[in-house]
Image (cartoon, grey):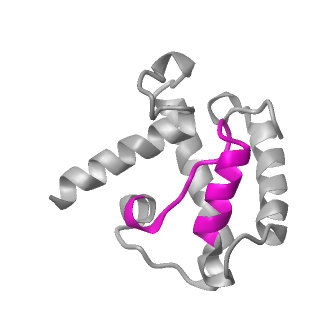
Amino acid sequence: MTGYKINNLNNTEEQEIKDKLSILFDNFEVMVKKAKLVGVSKALHHLLPDLVPPIDRKYTLHFFYGNTNYSEKDQKEKFLAIFDKFRLISKELDLTEKDLLGQWDTSIPKLIDNAIIGFVSDVKM
């Protein structure tokens, strides 16, 4: 899956990638099962930074769902749904590597993550 970028996936590639990410999510063990969503997403983001968004409770889940809760059963579904949301954002904003301006913007998924962190931080203050 290296070489793929979230902002360049066509519909066929997206489904193929989601199928592979689903398998990885099921079989990648980095943290206890209760926190798998956060642990797997962050580990996969480090391995595939142009493809997989990092997910955390405080910012990502709050931004998309208005809360920081998830059950052990729906972690993979949320992981894949958030992947879809990041892909949609990257497509709608037509993000490219030219948009990576700051030292923290290391990839398109991280750029979106940084924007979410900034937005949620401003709203909470």
User: Residue 77: x percent and y percent?
Assistant: 65, 68
Q: Horizontal placement of 16 versus 93: left or right?
A: right
Image quarter of the N terminus? top right
Asked if residue 56 is among those painted magenta in the image, a careful observer would answer: yes
- Measured along the vertical axis of the image, is residue 122 above or below residue 94? below
Q: Would residue 89 be visible to someone looking at this image?
A: no
Please provide the residue range marked out in magenta.
Answer: 37-59
Q: Residue shown at 54%/32% (left/top)? A: 106
Q: Depth check: give the residue in front, 49 or 85.
A: 49
In the picture, residue 23 is in which quadrant?
bottom right
Q: Residue shown at 47%/36% (left/top)? A: 111
Q: Residue shown at 59%/48% (left/top)? A: 53
User: Residue 22: x percent and y percent?
Assistant: 78, 62
Image quarter of the C terminus? bottom left
User: Residue 34: x percent and y percent?
Assistant: 61, 83
Q: Depth check: give the residue in front, 103 or 15.
A: 103
Q: Depth check: give the residue in front, 11 or 21.
A: 21
Residue extending furthest toward the top:
98
- Measured along the vertical axis of the image, is residue 42 above or below residue 10? below
